Amino acid sequence: MPTSEGILQGLFLIANTYTWMAIIWHILFYFLIAALLLNWKPSNRTLSVLLGLPLLTVSLFGWITGNPFNGTFFLLFGFLLIIFGSRNSEISINTNHTWSTVLGSIIVIFGLLYPHFLDTDNYFLYLYAAPAGLVPCPSLSTVIGFAILYNGFQSRTWSLILVVPGLIYGLIGTFKLQVYLDMVLLIASVILIIMAFQIPKKIVASGQ
């Protein structure tokens, strides 16, 4: 495991060298948000599979910058989310609670505007170049935010797979790296655990 200083240097390097990829991810996420606001209703299966993809690019940049732990970990969990997401319900996504809609939206926004690692005095830059899709915590926060927003895509298994990296990186970021913003990721992961165990048993019994 690299030292805290080495991890932080690697994350700063990724965020400030590969901003072009962050811009691409922001365009994709904003397009997704716009489509959802315009009442596009993809299936739980479709959206949960798509949300595994940001973890794969986090893995890629982990390997590129010499962090095989992140590279391996996010490759594994990215594929797990895609594989188990492909088994999710074809029923359209839905939001059942006002509190989860509001909270999930806030966490998605937090992930997309994650105000750390990007070295700039221009705060407007965070709107489209914050390191979501590049480094662990903003990427996980964004994905978990969508999961909270849409009731864990009605899959206890998929949700519990996602909270594993959420809890681990929330703890590492907050307590090892002392990036206290990552407490948001930690709290979001705990909320998703609670939501996962509230998914109706008939859905869980069907293999989800």
Image (cartoon, rainbow, N blue to C red):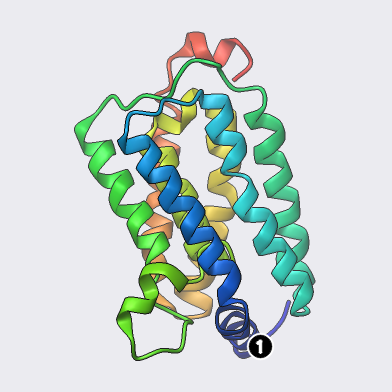
Q: Nearer the viewer, residue 54 or 100?
A: 54
As drawn, is 95 to the left or to the right of 204? left
Examine the rendered structure and indicate whether residue 65 appears above or below residue 34: below
Examine the rendered structure and indicate whether residue 193 appears above or below residue 208: below
x then y, percent, for residue 187: 37, 54
Type of amino acid at the residue the image marks with label 1: Gly
As drawn, is 181 to the left or to the right of 131? left
Q: Residue at x 60, y 10 (%)?
A: 206
- Say whether residue 189 is visible: no
Q: Residue at x 57, y 64 (%)?
A: 136
Residue 50 lies in quadrant: top right
Q: Nearer the viewer, residue 154 or 126?
A: 126
Residue 121 lies in quadrant: bottom left
User: Which element type, helix, strand or loop, lies under badge 1?
Assistant: helix
Q: Residue at x 63, y 31 (%)?
A: 85
- Say whether residue 146 is visible: yes
Quadrant in the picture for the N terminus: bottom right
Q: Nearer the viewer, residue 26 or 113?
A: 26
Q: Which residue is mark 1?
A: 6
As drawn, is 168 to the left or to the right of 61? left
x then y, percent, for residue 94: 36, 24
